[in-house]
């Protein structure tokens, strides 16, 4: 083989090797970009926006799309997204779906989310599932006594007990059950809402304000809208109708489909903006000079 032929073959080999390496690098870059650049975060943000507007079904769709996309270095974001997904299920009263999400969160959580908070939200879903299964009837004394015996070992039963006592119009017992739950679990927005409502009904406005503040400052956003509603009602209870109306106006704009907020907003609107038109205006004032 001549020196020229040898050099030509060597040059072809180098060219082939260069092409192989270039293609491999391009494939790697495409793979890398697919794992680092996606619509994952955009879908998550869209879900959060829908969640905060009370559009929970649309929020679930956004969260599920986000979780379905594979992306490197997204583990912590996925944990928070799954927390939102679970709470959206909870608000739609899809309690078993919520429970499954919270359980998966506990398995995957690396400390990014407070484990006690996840557990308290799972127990909230379990309690509400049990309440839903029991219907709207008042529980028998025997059933309540059984729940009271079991609650120290299964704290979610305190939440079920509080609901049962509320149905019986026993606010003192409901308050005690919720307080017992808070002895073993951190405050979440559901417990803060329920307990602050009881305090307001009993006229203990300072205690109600304290629970509202605790609930709004915790990591959980599940029932933030109802806590904000209670903060407006609290202003109303204190006689600050203008402040209460301003708060309700903001909430009504944000949560247009929330019937509780809408009803209170419309009621307070009539207090702040009374109708000054007479019901039966003087017909004489409407007479003209037509001669008829």
Image (cartoon, rainbow, N blue to C red):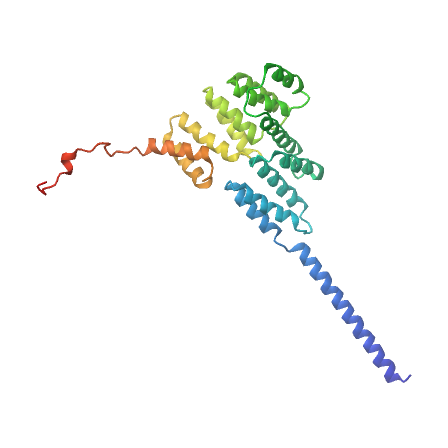
Q: How many marks?
A: 0
Residue 123 placed where, x, y %? 63, 29
Name the residue at 85% across, 80% down: 7
Name the residue at 58% across, 30% down: 188
Q: Quadrant of residue 232?
A: top left
In front of the other: 161 or 29: 161
Name the residue at 85% across, 79% down: 9
Residue 38 placed where, x, y %? 63, 55
Q: Quadrant of residue 125?
A: top right
Q: On screen, 103 above or below 173?
A: below
Does residue 290 appear left or right of residue 97 in this picture?
Answer: left
Q: Residue furthest right?
A: 1
Q: Is residue 36 visible?
A: yes
Q: Residue furthest front?
A: 292
Q: On screen, 290 above or below 71?
A: above
Q: On screen, 259 above or below 47?
A: above
* Quadrant holding the N terminus: bottom right
* Quadrant holding the C terminus: top left
Residue 165 placed where, x, y %? 55, 19
Does residue 41 appear left or right of residue 225 in this picture?
Answer: right
Does residue 276 appear left or right of residue 116 in this picture?
Answer: left
Q: Is residue 221 visible?
A: no
Residue 111 placed where, x, y %? 68, 38
């Amino acid at each position: 083989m001549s020196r020229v032929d040898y050099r030509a073959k060597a040059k072809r080999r180098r060219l082939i090797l260069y092409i192989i390496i270039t293609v491999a690098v391009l494939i790697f870059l495409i793979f890398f970009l697919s794992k680092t650049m996606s619509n994952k975060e955009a879908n998550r943000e869209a879900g959060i926006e829908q969640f905060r507007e009370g559009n929970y079904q649309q929020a679930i769709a956004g969260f599920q799309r986000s979780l379905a996309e594979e992306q490197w270095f997204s583990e912590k974001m996925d944990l928070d997204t799954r927390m939102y997904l679970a709470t959206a299920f909870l608000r739609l009263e899809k309690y078993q779906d919520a429970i499954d999400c919270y359980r998966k969160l506990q398995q995957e959580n690396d400390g990014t989310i407070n484990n006690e908070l996840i557990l308290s939200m799972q127990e909230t879903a379990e309690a509400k599932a049990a309440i839903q299964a029991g219907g709207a009837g008042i529980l028998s004394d025997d059933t309540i006594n059984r729940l009271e015996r079991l609650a120290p070992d299964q704290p979610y039963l305190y939440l079920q007990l509080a609901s049962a006592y509320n149905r019986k119009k026993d606010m003192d017992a409901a308050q005690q059950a919720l307080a017992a739950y808070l002895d073993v679990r951190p405050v979440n927005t559901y417990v803060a809402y329920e307990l602050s409502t009881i305090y307001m009904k009993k006229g203990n406005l300072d205690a109600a304000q304290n629970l509202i503040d605790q609930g709004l400052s915790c990591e959980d956003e599940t029932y933030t809208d109802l806590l904000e509603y209670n903060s407006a009602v609290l202003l109303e209870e204190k006689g600050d109708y203008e402040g209460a109306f301003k708060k309700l106006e903001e909430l009504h704009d944000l949560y247009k489909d929330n019937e509780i907020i809408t009803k209170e907003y419309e009621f307070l609107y009539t207090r702040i903006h009374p109708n000054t038109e007479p019901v039966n205006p003087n017909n004489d004032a409407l007479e003209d000079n037509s001669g008829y």
